[in-house]
Amino acid sequence: MKEMLINGRFTSGHAKEAIQVINPANEEILDEVPRGTVEDVDTAVAAAKAAFDNWRRMPAWERAGLLHEAANKMQAHEEELARLLTEEEGKPFVENEEELFWTYDTFHYYAELARHERGRFLPPGDPDQINFVIKEPFGVVGCIVPWNYPLLLLSWKLAAALAAGNTVVVKPSELTPLATLRLVEVAFDHLPPGVVNVVTGYGPEAGEALVEHPDVPMIAFTGSVETGQRIVRIAGPMMKKLHLELGGKDPMVVAPDVDLDTAVAGVAYAGLINAGQVCTSSERIYVHESLYGQFSEGLADFVGSLRLGNGLDPQIDMGPMIGNRFREKVEGQMAAAVQAGAQVLVGGKRPSALPQGYFLEPAVLVNVNHDMAIMRDETFGPVLPIMPYKTFDEAIQLANDTVFGLGASLMTQDARLVKRFFDDVKAGTIWINDPLTDNFAGPFGGMKMTGGGRELGQEGLDEFYEVKHVHWDVEGKRKEYWYPYGGTEG
Ligand code: NAD
């Protein structure tokens, strides 16, 4: 059994039970982790609280050095960590190598960004005044992470939180805690005890204990809308700072001028990377009517050629889904769509050649519409439903017809369409001809029901600071406008 990290020590804490971690590619038990309790969260929060004062006072250059060292250690263990991620999460090894690179690079990036500035100097309201704004850390930040990018999404919170001077208690997903535990073991042994803690366990137990804890003033959460709403209900009345990255239903619009092969390959990647289990997966495809038939057939051929299997096999393109209940949800959405008139051009079945593991053949659907759940609710699986559109106005209206606002993609070389798209589509990230790429210097996050939090960039660092405005009258003279009104003379 792997243990939790609390106050610089690996421990099973108060856990009386273990949680089994399953390899989704073969349904074998990989390992176990403690089912962390409320008491474990209490101990971890107390350790983080005790470590906070020294950590926040540490000069930024010194903290930056420690974070660079952590990043270098992650890089030194890149292959081992990518392998562990592949085993517990399922996506192809090559995608996990990329996840590792982005993970340690996030630590390098925030190490530098946080030593650059910590506030701003203001033009004074009076010649004797000095006015400035200090950005300061919150204290103990609770970071609650989902399973689809366990290390990447951890790093977007953890690196920024630590660089800003906060200490942290992490609650990884119960489905994918192993790479997180190994990462903190290999990369953070040089940090003072208590600065980073990891409590494993279930969301309604360990997760909620963290959300409820009075000594945790900020919760940074990535996960589903339902869990986000639960967190808001608990932490909202406590006036905690909430940083929420929730679900999506991203649109992809294909304009009539595209090169068909390029558009097909781009759409397949945008919808199917990590078996479609990406918050920014293109889950709704809108294709101009002039190429709808050709595009749909081309996409079905291309998707039908993708190879499924264990992510450790370098010959495969797509791994399994994370679990059976997630696969059943996708199958249910497809079945309901077919019942309402949709047609499956390819895929959608459990592959007979892979009886073990939570595999699902990637699917292309046509004859879909916005009355169907598959075009409205998050799918989080390998499905590409395609709808035709007539005018670009209609494409934009369809793209915006959602409660979510995470990302939106467009394929075109027409600059006027590009401008219309980024002006009029309500989403936190707009991708033109380049779906699902990240640039860590820019913010990532959503609008509407996706929650308003931003990660990455200066914006993603600023989320982990609260601001304080200092007014300082250097001369300290009595003011004319103080009592008594009318002046002191006479
Ligand atoms: P989830 O909401 O089920 O779980 C996420 C985390 O929250 C896990 O660690 C879980 O244990 C914990 N949790 C569950 N219930 C809790 C509770 N009551 N209190 C506190 N913590 C609790 O989500 P998931 O299935 O792990 O992840 C998939 C979801 O994450 C999708 O909806 C996806 O869109 C979203 N996601 C969003 C982004 C983004 O940046 N917007 C990125 C990745 C994933």
Image (spheres, grey):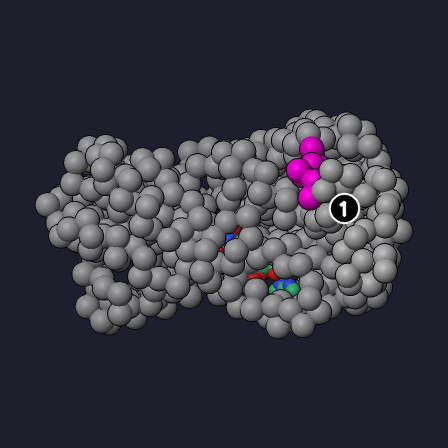
Q: Is residue 134 left or right of residue 446?
A: right
Across and down, in percent, residue 398 comes to 26, 57
Residue at the spot x=26%, y=52% of the render? 396
Residue 421, placed above or below residue 105: below
- Which secondary structure lies at badge 1? strand
Res. 136 in view: no
Q: Amino acid at mark 1?
A: Val
Q: Position of residue 310 (x, y in %)?
A: 48, 43
Reading the image, the residue beneath label 1 is 470
Where is residue 151 shown, x and y percent of the image? Answer: 62, 43
Extent of the magenta region: 117-125
Instruction: Name above or below for residue 258 compared with residue 334.
Output: above
Which quarter of the rendering shows the C terminus? bottom right
Residue at 56% across / 69% down in the picture?
Answer: 229
Please tell me whether residue 122 belongs to the stretch shown in magenta.
yes
Of the four image quadrants, the one with ligand 1 is bottom right
